[in-house]
């Protein structure tokens, strides 16, 4: 079925045939389609006066066009002015899955870099539990993995509103599990996820190395799979590169379909820019689109950030969109993206990974596990911040710079020869960067 935008454009073409260009621009230039569901089309225009004209003069034409397209009678509602804000809030309150809002297959731009993952996602959405189970989508951050994951959920929810669906991130699963253990509600926790018709788990790299979490994910996986229900997971790399991932869980994942998402080529980036700008009501000059596509090559999320910033320049500052403003927007977005964590965050995430407290790493405990965690955190602090060796030592009860340097060099040597240590450092780094 066509997207809402395409359907509305077809209706506008019908209207445009019967009125003058001046009349068309007067009544429909700022009229947007908001929602099409349950035999009802919701539009939005800028004023109550325009709403009255659209309903009285063009309401029958719009309803007739909808009947021709869908062979059923449609209700027409037109929102005016700020009414759209309350309508949007109310729609989100009604939705049991607000995470899926705005994520669907219609607004996902397909190119050579993601064509296979997109096709697999659609196949799963159309036949949950029947094909490609589990589906595992992997790739670097900001390439659309979560979009595909939530689009699957949105499509299945639309086709099967009776389904029990769960969406969560890997670290959220860990936090819920810990809470259930602390509060004695483990049985409730198990029942919550093991009976799902669809489990959508994002960023499962965050569960690697967490023994209790992986054990629970394994049993949850088995319960859902054996019931013939669908599992979809995403991560920033394939299972074989997660050395601390439980072998049983890795085998289960690799038994399904694995689809990677690569950075988009320039044609796909161009289409994404135009699409994102149009969704925000912004028409960008070709030279601006080309400049953005050539400047940001590997992260769709950064592209979205630039387009949103340009929209703000235009609306708030009444600034025209030029190459100069694009350069400013790109500089600001990339600077924001270069997250520099605080020493506290690095120590907290390293301690959490090793099931320790931050005070253990800062203090004088000398157990093997604590010493290793402390050395890893020093290495990360040296590589992820601009702190000197002396400054790093001050984070650990005033250890001197030679102790810090020795710890850093030890981890550097281990990274060259021990894949498990390399995976540990990568996992902790991902956890730290997720807090940006």
Image (cartoon, rainbow, N blue to C red):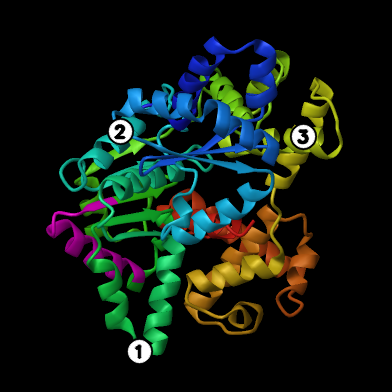
Tag 1 or tag 2, which sits nearer the N-term?
2
**Tag 1 secondary structure:** loop
Judge depth for marks 2 and 3 and give the one in front.
2
| Label 2 crowd bin: few (<14), some (14–19), many (20+), radius 10 Å | few
| Tag count | 3
Q: Is residue 127 above or below residue 377?
A: above
- Residue 299 shows in the view: no
Query: With 353 as the anchor, is 166 left or right in this view?
Result: left
Which residue is more in the foreground, 137 or 244? Answer: 137
- In front here: 234 or 16? 16
In the rendered view, tell whether residue 418 sits above or below residue 396: above
Alpha-carbon span between mark 2 and mark 3: 47 Å
Please tell me whether mark 2 sits on a helix, a strand or a loop.
loop
Q: Residue under circle 1? A: 184
Q: How far apart are marks 1 and 3 (CA)?
A: 50 Å
- Identify the mark at residue 329; answer none if there is no mark: 3
Secondary structure at numbered mark 3: helix
Q: Please name the residue shown 59% across and 59% down the image.
A: 432
Whether residue 221 appears in magenta in the rendering, the answer is yes
One can see residue 436 in this view: yes
Camera-side residue of 218 and 389: 218
Residue 258's spot in the image, x, y percent?
29, 40
Image position of 294 (left or right of 153): right
Which of the two labelled residues, at mark 2 and mark 3, occupies the earlier sequence position?
A: 2
Residue at the image position 50 percent from the left and 26 percent from the top: 264
Boundaries of the magenta span: 213-231
């Amino acid at each position: 079925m066509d997207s809402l935008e395409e359907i509305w454009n077809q209706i506008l073409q019908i209207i445009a045939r019967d009125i003058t260009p001046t009349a068309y621009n007067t009544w429909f230039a700022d009229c947007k389609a908001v929602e099409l569901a349950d035999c009802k089309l919701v539009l939005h225009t800028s004023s109550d006066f325009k709403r009255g004209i659209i309903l009285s003069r063009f309401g029958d034409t719009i309803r007739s066009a909808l009947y021709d397209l869908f062979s059923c009678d449609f209700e027409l509602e037109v929102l005016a002015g700020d009414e759209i804000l309350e309508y949007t809030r109310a729609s989100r309150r009604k939705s049991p899955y607000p995470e899926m809002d705005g994520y669907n297959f219609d607004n996902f731009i397909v190119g050579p870099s993601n064509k296979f993952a997109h096709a697999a996602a659609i196949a799963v959405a159309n036949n949950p539990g029947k094909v490609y189970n589990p589906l595992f989508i992997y790739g670097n951050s900001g390439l659309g993995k979560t979009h595909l994951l939530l689009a699957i959920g949105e499509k299945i929810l639309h086709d099967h509103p009776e389904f029990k669906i769960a969406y969560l991130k890997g670290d959220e699963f860990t936090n819920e599990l810990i809470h259930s253990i602390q509060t004695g509600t483990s049985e409730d926790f198990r029942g919550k996820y093991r009976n799902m018709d669809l489990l959508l788990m994002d960023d499962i790299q965050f569960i690697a190395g967490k023994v209790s979490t992986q054990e629970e994910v394994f049993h949850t996986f088995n319960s859902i799979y054996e019931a013939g229900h669908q599992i979809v997971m995403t991560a920033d790399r394939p299972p074989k590169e997660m050395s601390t991932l439980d072998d049983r869980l890795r085998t289960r994942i690799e038994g399904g379909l694995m689809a990677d998402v690569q950075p988009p080529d320039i044609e796909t980036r161009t289409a994404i820019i135009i699409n994102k700008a149009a969704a925000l009501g912004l028409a960008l000059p070709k030279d601006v689109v080309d400049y953005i596509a050539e400047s940001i090559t590997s992260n769709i999320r950064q592209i979205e950030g630039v387009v949103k910033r340009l929209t703000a320049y235009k609306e708030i500052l009444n600034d025209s969109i030029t190459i100069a403003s694009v350069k400013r927007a790109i500089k600001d977005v990339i600077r924001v993206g270069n997250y520099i964590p605080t020493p506290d965050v690095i120590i907290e995430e390293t301690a959490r990974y090793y099931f320790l407290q931050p005070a253990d790493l800062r203090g004088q405990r000398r157990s093997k596990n604590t010493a290793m965690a402390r050395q890893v955190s020093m290495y990360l602090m040296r590589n992820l911040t601009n702190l000197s060796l002396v400054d790093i030592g001050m984070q650990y009860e005033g250890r001197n710079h030679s102790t810090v340097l020795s710890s850093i060099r030890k981890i550097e040597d281990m990274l060259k020869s021990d894949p498990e240590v390399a995976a540990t450092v990568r996992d902790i780094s991902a956890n730290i960067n997720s807090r940006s």
